[in-house]
Image (cartoon, rainbow, N blue to C red):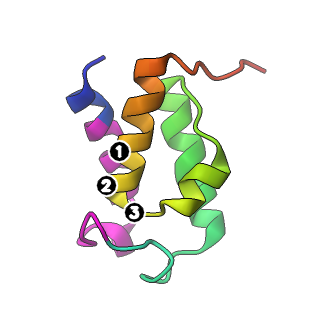
Amino acid sequence: MSDADVRSIVLGVIHSKPSLQSLPGDQDFFEAGTSSLTVIDMQLQIEEKLGVTVPTSHLMANPMKDGWVAAYIEAKSAGKVAAVS
């Protein structure tokens, strides 16, 4: 899977939330009024689609589209495979 594919999946999930569709890539989700439950929901959807995990603490420290895209590209490159339950 290419970096462009990862970016497309991450942004697709984020953009599925109407309040985040027009949010600039460097604006904080929380400053835009997004709840932590919505952030976790997006994380779970992205990780299911990509088959990789990023620590929640890392995503919460970088709660922006650009930050999440970079984090998931890095995780995919490093092969941080999600545990199957």
Front residue of this view, candidates 54 and 44: 54
Q: Which residue is mark 1?
A: 69
Q: Residue 82 — which label?
A: none
For label 3, the SS is loop
Assess whether mark 1 and mark 2 are in contact (beta carbons under 8 angstroms): yes
- Give the residue displayed 26% in from the left and 39% down from the top: 8
Circle 3: residue type: Met
Task: Give the residues drawn in magenta, as a range.
Answer: 7-26
Circle 1: residue type: Val
Q: Residue 64 — which label?
A: 3
For label 2, the SS is helix
In this rendering, position of residue 38 left or right of residue 71 = right
Front residue of this view, candidates 62 and 39: 62
Q: Which residue is mark 2?
A: 66
- Give the residue displayed 26% in from the left and 63% down from the top: 25
Give coordinates of residue 27: x percent, y percent. Answer: 33, 73
The answer to whether residue 34 is above or below residue 54 is below
For label 1, the SS is helix
Give coordinates of residue 85: x percent, y percent. Answer: 78, 21
